[in-house]
Image (spheres, rainbow, N blue to C red):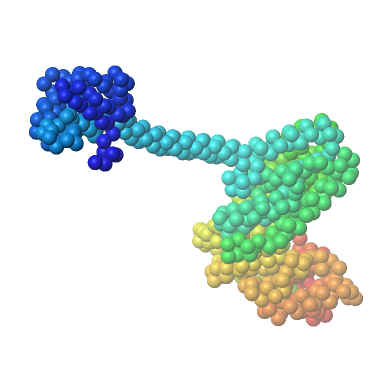
Amino acid sequence: MDAARLPFAVMIGPGHRVSYVNAAFCRLAGTRSEEIVGISFSHFLPPGDECLLHMSQVLSSGEALSHAEPIDAKPHPLYWSYEIWPIWKDDPHYESPLGVSILVTESAPFHRRASAMNEALLVSAVRQHELIEEAEMLRKKLEEEIQERQQAEAAIEQVAFYDALTDLPNRRLLMDRLHQALSVCSRTLRGAAILFIDLDRFKTLNDTRGHHVGDLLLQAVARRLTTCVRKCDTVGRLGGDEFVVIIQELSANRGRAKEQAKKVAAKILDSLNEPYLLGRHEHRGTGSVGITTFGSRSDTVEDLMKQADLALYRAKREGGGTIRFYEAEMHAASARRALLEADLRHGIQKGQFLLYYQPQVNSDGQLTGAEALLKWQHPTRGLLSSSEFITFAEECGLIEPIGQWVMEEACIQLMKWSLQQDSAQLKLAINISGREFNHPDFIERLLAIVDLTGADPTKLIIELTERVTFGELDLIRPKMSTLKKRGFSFALDDFGIGFSSLASLQHLPLDQLKIDRAFIEDLRVQGNSGAIVGAMIALGKSLGVAVIAEGVETQEQLDILVTQGCQIYQGFLFGRPGPEEELWLPSSNPSISNDNTLSGRSS
């Protein structure tokens, strides 16, 4: 027999007394062999147990017997299955066994304990696996919750302190950084500066290209500004196209600090002047910078912000693309501007604006039309020319209602002229600002006014400056072409002051070139101005457009212009701007004689 199958062994002799047990059986019985050998095996079993019957059967028959309980049976606690073998003496005369050997192959308690242990181990393993899975799931869930909370906190902080479009610090965070900069200056006695940066003509881009393109430009500007400063400095966005740079760790010397701040500002302007690729379009633009420096003096954050803003305003008023430092007199100028804005709004409401008309005559001295010039009948300052308020009206956003009124009055005047035989052929030129013309609804507004008043669009000349016309050429040209098809004419005002691209002139639907008065003022028989004006007139003829000379005030100027072939003239020599009733009528116009002198003109 295989010993591995017989872990528990006991030999029983006559009278069912135990004669031998192995160590395994002792461990199973829970006692020593000395206490087992010699006692009846029935001591371990209840009376009448099946096992005792089986032993008796083996002793009497001499044949081995095996027994196994079913798995679902409830055996005696001592064993579960066993084998009983007879023990024979070597003498063949013995016909009966001397005893039996009981081999217990699996005891019920052991089996139960092993099964319970295995089950417990299995349950423990399963539970441990479940606990590990639960712990891992809990860990992941906690990590996700922590990450979500961190993301939520970061999102809240981003919204609270950073600009959504550019990811730069917003006004709230900028003010905090400025407070910190003031504290650092007070503690270290070092200098610092605030730079206000504004994009020139950004509204034009927004109106013409759309806000999406404007947003792309703002994002590109934010990236460029960040590359122009150090880590200790702060770049932020106030809103719109206004950016702020806080420069720290400047010299304690005020003059030296201004030089350092100006160097950074110049670097910023150079960066902003580089072309931008916005989607499929290339854009070129400039910026203006206003600067105020500060140190250990007791300036407040609000004071510094206002100072930098005033300096920026001065930079933009002087044409943009430049740098200006804050000066004390700017406060007084700011107060005057605030008063002017209030007066302008009041003037629009009360209808205080007028149109004056300055005659335009041809080379035969005949009145061909007039230029409408805007005037403001100020209640205390008297009659103001457009040069005294029109630029400011553009800056403060009031040019559109004023321009609307000018277009309406001009069309009404054209309609009146068309009803009279002597004035039916007169044309009227009106100046349109860049902000007006670039507005997305400009064409619709103008056509609505023409339709409402019944004015003839072929008698209306729209004057645009060189700065407007060549600023966004690919946007201006389609608008001009659309209006040209409706009969409107176009004049290029202030021609020759340096913005024109001669190569682009031939691609614009122009009807007139208006030579800037600066060239006419210096016009002499002998001099470079005459040659320049002559070249302009020749250029106009080569392009097939009429040339107007404005600012003609003397006979000498007129003589030179007539000799060089100029077709139309405007200036004090022919009449000052005045109300419509003072405009010359064709019957009373002077003429230009063959010897190039005026005749029939009253002094």
Q: Position of residue 361 (x, y in %)?
A: 72, 70
Q: Is residue 3 left or right of residue 74?
A: right
Choose top left, top right, bottom left or bottom right for residue 72: top left
Tell me the quadrant of the picture where the N terminus can be found: top left
Q: Position of residue 34 (x, y in %)?
A: 30, 20
**Residue beneath the point at 60% across and 55% down:** 216
Q: Position of residue 253 (x, y in %)?
A: 89, 40
Q: Name above or below for residue 515 compared with residue 18.
A: below
Q: Is residue 529 visible?
A: yes
Total count of labels: 0
Q: Name above or below for residue 16 compared with residue 233.
A: above
Choose top left, top right, bottom left or bottom right for residue 374: bottom right
- Of residues 87 and 530, which is closer to you in this image? 87
**Residue beneath the point at 68% across and 44% down:** 236
Tell me the quadrant of the picture where the C terminus can be found: bottom right
**Residue beneath the point at 59% across and 53% down:** 215
Q: Is residue 39 left or right of residue 598?
A: left
Q: Is residue 369 visible?
A: no
- Of residues 256 and 593, which is closer to you in this image? 256
Q: Position of residue 240 (x, y in %)?
A: 63, 47
Q: Is residue 120 left or right of residue 11?
A: right
**Residue beneath the point at 70% across and 45% down:** 235
- Of residues 473 and 563, which is closer to you in this image? 473
Q: Name above or below for residue 459 compared with residue 311.
A: below
Choose top left, top right, bottom left or bottom right for residue 468: bottom right
